Image: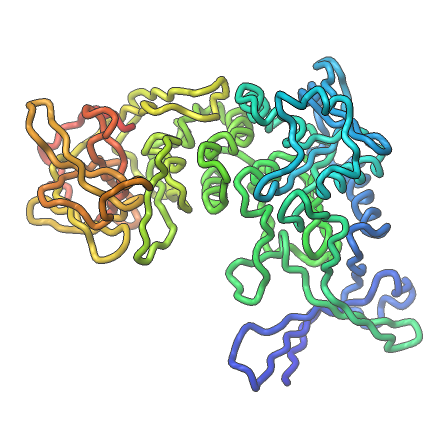
Amino acid sequence: MTVYLHISSIDIINPYEPLRDPITIEYYRPADLTPEESRLAYKDIPVRPHINAPHSKEAFDFLKGCLTNCNQRHVLCKRTISPPPKRLLRIGTSRANLVELPPTFEKCHYVALSYCWGDDIVIKTTKDNIEDRKQGLDLLKLPATIRDAAHITRKLGGIYLWVDALCIVQDDPKDWEEQAAKMSSIYEQAYLTIMASSADSADISFLEHSSRPPRVQCRVAADIVLAARLPCKSGHHYIPVKSNVQSQERIFTRGWTLQEEVLSTRTISYSKDELQWRCKTIGSCECQTPAAVWREHYTNNRLMNWDKIVDEYTQRQLTFPADKLPALSGICQLVKSQTGSRYLAGLWQDRLVPNLLWECRTYFSSSRSWIGSDYVAPSFSWASIDYHVKPFDPSGFHEYARLVKSDILLSCDDPFGRVKRGSSITMEGKLFHNAGIRRGKYARKYHISFGDKDDLFSSDVDLETFSHTDSDGLLQRSVKRSTRDSSKEAAEIESGSTVSLFLLGQREHKYSWCFLVLGVSTFNRNAYERLGLWGTGMLGRDFFNGCITQSITIM
């Protein structure tokens, strides 16, 4: 067995096993066993604290220390006085009562909980039981995650806790939409947000979670103790590209929890390995090793960082597809307040053309891909598909199209919430009709042909032919996205099917023309729907000669 020594870690490789990633072991001098006068000895080995159980005094002291430091020193983390959430849980010694505080109630210090429901949550507020909730719930009968959050709230000297399952009337659409629209202020104004990262569902305790990196220690001199442990690999130490790390904690795979983390002024994450602190000023953790990835865009949500949010958000899952836009509503409010740009169902008017050039990045081998049967967003929005989306890098990009008007039909009062079928944008630019289309060899790859040119483009999902009657009464074959309940085979692109190409711009450094591939809308035959993207460097400028600029509607 070969051992490689580094400044603060040991990589161990067994030569008798197939080559694989080495096992990394951190070694350090325990802070509580290293007096000041002996810290010069073994000075290349860092002095760090042990990682203790999440319910331990040491873990709570870490949380208290972070809060004290933030309250006393961090100007960015000062909260403004604003009305409290509509409802809160008042935590007593043995019961929790649902209360409605008046908007004039100032300086309401409350803790918010970010967690995973699991398949479902047993205890939630409905129209039938809201009065019973006001009478109180036995703390011992609450799901373990909520019970733990109530315990921490009381231990911090607080009495108010916000939990979505109990503070939102879950079967009242009006109340749900109203509270979803206030997520930005609810999490931003919370004194602290507790992230139950180690709990995959609400019935699992994150305080009784016993998994901590194993450690050993030995005394090498009268006043020198050395210790070794496996490194933390959860939370901000998680590196998805390495094969030897544990899977990501479930809370970081759920759609709703992204904005809960982004919007919060302060969060304490009870991860599988340790407690991790993040506020608008700094990040810290019990192991005191640097974070693998510090997500700077979480604390600086301007329009320039929207692409990073979309990239991460579309890799997460939602139980209900209809929540695709509402689950980002709070972040959208923040971006709107900072930029003043108009929101268009997942895109922003000030950067609309680059925003339109998003691309589906989910890999499909031979499996089907489709859009859901229920309408979620217009086809020009990334929110219209349920796959990972990679936003477009606009550096060196010249726009050749512009927005004429937008018509986003809201289904509720929240301008960043759900939208209705018929939402559209009208763009002005160059449109090329009647490009032939046939299926390529690989999933989501299709050939388009026009004149003597033939090239591949990437569709958003699988495509299929549909027939329609044009304005002259003639039968035409266009193409649409496949839906989950489609009876057609994905490979069925009938001969004679055509698509249109709308020029959005050109990438200077790649000499690539960027087109939206469009089909006739299934909702409005005078409009179009997005099918995918085509980028090509095979066209000369003479290709555009004689092509007039026109206005088109994309739904």
Residue 57: image x %, image y %? 86, 50
Residue 26: image x %, image y %? 71, 68
- At x 12% / y 43%, what residue is drawn? 436
Depth check: give the residue in front, 533 or 206. Answer: 206
Specify the quadrant of the image occupied by residue 381. Answer: top left
The total of numbered circles placed on residues is 0
Specify the quadrant of the image occupied by residue 140. Answer: top right
**Can the viewer see residue 187 in this picture?**
no
256 left or right of 453 in image: right
Viewport quadrant of the N terminus: bottom right
Residue 125: image x %, image y %? 65, 27
Residue 258: image x %, image y %? 56, 40
Q: Is residue 535 above or below residue 326?
A: below
**Can the viewer see residue 501 in this picture?**
yes
- At x 50% / y 27%, what residue is drawn? 339
522 left or right of 252 in image: left
- At x 21% / y 42%, what residue is drawn? 464
Depth check: give the residue in front, 525 or 509. Answer: 525
Colour basis: rainbow
Specify the quadrant of the image occupied by residue 351. Answer: top left
353 left or right of 466 in image: right
Viewport quadrant of the C terminus: top left
